[in-house]
Amino acid sequence: MKIHHLRTHRSDENLAREGQLAWQLAGVAVDPVEVDDEVVEMVVNRVIDNAAVAAASLARRPVVAARSQALAHPVSIGGDGATVVGADAARRTSPEWAAWANGVAVRELDFHDTFLAADYSHPGDNIPPIVAVAQHLAASRGLTGRDLVRGIATGYEIQVDLVKAITLHAHKIDHVAHLGPSAAAGIGTLLGLDQETIFQAIGQALHTTTATRQSRKGEISTWKAYAPAFAGKMAVESVDRAMRGETSPVPIYEGEDGVIAWLLGGPEATYEVPLPETGEAKRAILDSYTKEHSAEYQAQALIDLARKLHDEYPLILDDPDRIESITIHTSHHTHNVIGTGANDPQKYDPDASRETLDHSIPYIFTVALQDGAWHHADSYSPERAHRPDTVALWRKVSTVEDPEWTRRYHSLDIGEKAFGGRVVIRLADGNEIVDEIAVADAHPLGARPFGREQYVEKFRTLAEWVLEPAEIDRFLDVAQRLPELGPDELGRLTITAAPGALSHVEIPAGLF
């Protein structure tokens, strides 16, 4: 790896292209290095993972709304259009709208892959816009599954590298600000665009996708699912403009009035961004990890610990009156984003939105502890959230920051990097139950790491309610042959709901 030194530059310094981060990112995108077999395998896994969580969300209101918006738009004249998950594969739309609808479906349940470092990310959000463009231009440009794999590998590489180096959340900027540039770069790799064009697309994508973190604060709204879909849509549009010769604000990161100076650390801030050397394989996808449970990633390990404690102490933990308090000692991020450090009273409100509850570790830990399980729908139901014994125990759960867990969270050593915590359950009789967990069971270093078998099972489990068995098998066949797919097969990289499976879903009316 090489390190790119990033800082603000005065306008009179005339920072050359080669010194700008966006140019360096574009350089990663144009590097023709081959994709490692291990990376190809993981790209296939994540395509299956995305389809799984999209299938599970097809009847949810934000996904229905986004899908209806997309299907209201015709195929643009520059290609054959892209598919919309859930709809008939023959029903296509313009690629930016497919990226929009499919991005919402993938993100809605907070159930796909993650990478956490200096900032947060769901790098699987790169897949919908890159796939949409691949489908749209497959025939005219002769794009193949191998091209798509290369584009996705670039998207992951750039997003993970940015997340390792540049914190957005500390300045209350939403994490999708790293997604616009990474998706634009991934599309650039897919299409074999030149460095100048990708450079301009990255700048435009970043400029149009910086927004505040209020979308993940307090009463969290349905926009949480739309935010990364919007970034993907903007990436597609930015590439389109750049291909037509249109330019972006330069230098987008380093300018006196640029992103660093006014949205991030300020004019004096510096960042060290790791990037692969020319000819070095793009392997960042291997640093990311998926979710076994539908909840914010920092809750994954704690759900697993709660399930373990449920099995070990069923009689004690069955009665909230036996418990005086539950304190979760964890990292700064977990404490301040999904814990009591956020100072969000909504995290203790039984009437809070699902989006709010999946960012409440007090709620999540309580339910997982009582049930010994976690379900992407049932665990968030209003009936479950209002259960009196749950509310009573929920109010006794709090988090505190532990410097050691914060250090491990930020560690660059994968062997000690941790996203869990230590739980202290103080009982009414004065005794304590103490246990801890570092990483989720499904993490590569966890008790039950996810492999192809688990990704396939996740898809089958989440899709069985809405897809016919033959459709499940068809998609898995296509997805697992991704590197060998020809231009005529990329359009099959989608899922179609069974006849009548979504007939009960009310289609909202809008402008389109």
Image: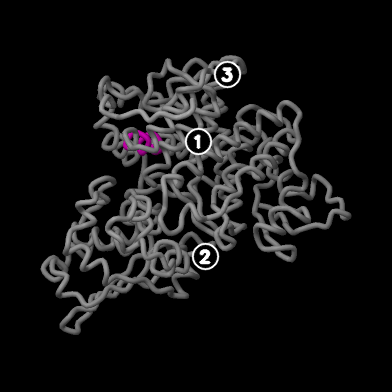
Residue type for callout 3: Ser
From the image, tell me which residue sits under label 1. Answer: 127
Closest to the camera, between mark 2 and mark 1, is 1
**What residue is rendered at 37% in x and 48% in y?**
291
- How crowded is the residue under tag 3: few (<14 C-alpha within 10 Å), some, or many (20+)? some
Q: Is residue 281 visible?
A: no
Position of 240 with respect to 470 (left or right) is right
Taken as a whole, is the magenta stretch helix, strand or loop? helix
- Assess disc 1: are there few (<14), some (14-19) or many (≥20) residues with their C-alpha within 10 Å of its C-alpha: many
Q: Are marks 2 and 3 in contact (CB under 8 Å)?
A: no
Q: Which residue is mark 3?
A: 76
Quarter-of-image position of residue 398: bottom left
Q: Which mark is residue 313?
A: none
Camera sees residue 366: yes
Q: Is residue 55 magenta?
A: yes
Task: Report the residue that reaches farthest toward the bottom.
Answer: 430
Q: Are marks 3 and 1 in contact (CB under 8 Å)?
A: no
- Disc 3 and disc 1: Cα gap in Å? 20 Å
**Image coords of residue 109 (percent x, y):** 36, 44
Q: Residue at x 17, y 62 (%)?
A: 388
> Residue at the spot x=55%, y=21% of the render?
136
Question: Does dot 3 land on a helix, a strand or a loop?
Answer: loop
Q: State the residue position of label 2.
A: 411
What residue span does the magenta drawing correspond to? 49-56
For label 2, count other residues whose C-alpha is less than 10 Å away and answer few (under 14), some (14-19) or many (20+): some
User: Residue 299: horizontal and vertical position, in percent?
Assistant: 36, 58
Nearest to N terminus: mark 2 or mark 1: 1
* Camera-nearest label, 3 or 1: 3
Distance between the alpha carbons at the discs numbered 2 and 1: 27 Å
In the image: residue 199, left or right of residue 309: right
Mark positioned earlier in the residue sequence (2 or 3) = 3
Direction left: furthest residue:
315
